[in-house]
Amino acid sequence: MRRVLDRLPEGTVAVGGGLVVNGLTAYMFITLASRDLGAEAYSPVGLLWALSFLLGPGFFQPLEQETTRVIASHPSDPPRLVVGPAAIMGGSLALGLVVVALVAAPWMVDGLFAGHGVLLVGLLLVLVGLGAGHLARGMLAGLNRFGGYARYFIGDGVGRLALVGVLGLVLTDEVAIYGLAIGGAPFLGVAAALAGRRSDGARCPDPAAEVGPVPVAEGTVNRRGGLAALAPAMGALLVASVSTAIVLNVSPLAVELLAGPSEGHEAGRFLNALLVARVPLFFFQAVQASLLPRLSALAADRRFDEFRHVLGRLLALVGFLGLAAVVACGLVGHRVVELAFGAEFAVDRRDMLLLASSSAVLMVVLCLAQALIALRWQGRMAMAWLVGLLAFPIVLAVGSDLFLRVELALLATVSTSMVAMSVLLGRRFRLLQ
């Protein structure tokens, strides 16, 4: 166990603890929703869940990543010089997404949410809440305050269940209860993350730096340069983040769009199987949160040998754990789905094996992506995601089995991105020598 922990970046265990609570509460929430609503009524709620991870992290993950990278790369600068401009950027982006969602409201309510307008309200809450959440997480990760980062996940997960209980006392529409709980949970996560954040034992800026003049020099973030430090890579990171979110969440949406008239419940069945197969990927967020600040600090100090050593050890561990997860899902994953969600959500062993394989490869891809971000090759990393996404519609067009088409398309997408990023990372290291 000590050898395993030594391969993990600092903060992984703390964030992992928060994710354990979040994961348990998330699966409790999904199980309650599945059993209370039934397969047909659950499908639009499940799509709200999927859309929240497609639109929220898809657009706001770059804000977290760049906030983390800039703060970690400039430990002597006051973090407020980065957080202020990041908040302006995040708020503007959230407002733009809300406007787009309102314009598309008629289509979304009828086409995705089966006429439940309250689910659109839940989506709007998710967009604003996750924007605030990613900004808070970026600041905390850059400052190595992983205790606060972990509290975000605890507040989000426990808060979602608490909202179900509270809303159940005042609402009779079960779809509204679960939809609004999804929308309100990120706000509770932010409140928990920021509560007592200075007691996490992380670095604090020099008090004199908060009031004294900040030198304007190369490699520092000055009072007017916070936005300039964040903005250049945001476009590429936005492309990469949306691409990542599409990879993570497009499969249940593809099932919904390709399903025939008699297959209205298939999207919910597929989503629950995907959730079980992605349990390792869910907890991989703990590694991802602590990996970027570690690699960014090493890259800023030009300690590239140590950079390669840290990344190589982590990739070996992730590969081993991913293989173990594939074997476990192939053996008992289909039974876990049926036991957790009921017989009407049952899937085949083949489905779980393919979904677990795509999740294992995706963990490797995310490690490589973090390394490219730390080495400031965000644009090329985004191109690798786009190359991978090209494989999805090509493979999806082959065959007639609904689940198999989507599963193979997903596996082809992440595998293509993994190869592209591996080539780019090797080239980047050669240029740095």
Image (cartoon, rainbow, N blue to C red):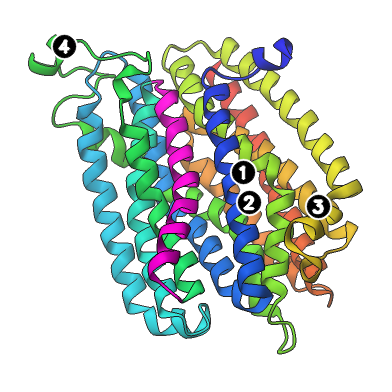
Mark 3, other Cα within 10 Å: few <14 / some 14–19 / many ≥20 = some
Mark 2, other Cα within 10 Å: few <14 / some 14–19 / many ≥20 = some
Q: Nearer the viewer, residue 374 or 272?
A: 272
Q: Amino acid at mark 4?
A: Pro
Tell me the CA gap for discs 1 and 2: 5 Å
Quadrant of res 205: top left
Q: Nearer the viewer, residue 51 or 34?
A: 34
**CB contact under 8 Å: marks 1 and 2:** yes
Residue receiving disc 2: 27
Q: Secondary structure at mark 1?
A: helix
The range drawn in magenta is 144-172
Query: Which residue is the extreme one toward the bottom?
Result: 261
Of callouts 3 and 4, which one flags the residue occurring earlier in the amino acid sequence?
4
Residue receiving disc 3: 336
Residue receiving disc 4: 207
Q: Is residue 197 visible?
A: yes
Of callouts 2 and 3, which one flags the residue occurring earlier in the amino acid sequence?
2
Say which quadrant the N terminus sits in. Answer: top right
Mark 1, other Cα within 10 Å: few <14 / some 14–19 / many ≥20 = few
Identify the residue at horizontal 24%, vertical 18% (top origin).
77
**CB contact under 8 Å: marks 4 and 1:** no
Magenta span: helix, strand or loop, mainly?
A: helix
Q: Nearer the viewer, residue 147 or 52?
A: 147
Tell me the CA gap for discs 2 and 3: 12 Å
Of callouts 1 and 3, which one flags the residue occurring earlier in the amino acid sequence?
1
Quadrant of res 320: top right
Q: Amino acid at mark 2?
A: Tyr
Tell me the CA gap for discs 2 and 4: 43 Å
**CB contact under 8 Å: marks 2 and 4:** no
Q: Secondary structure at mark 3?
A: helix
Residue receiving disc 1: 24
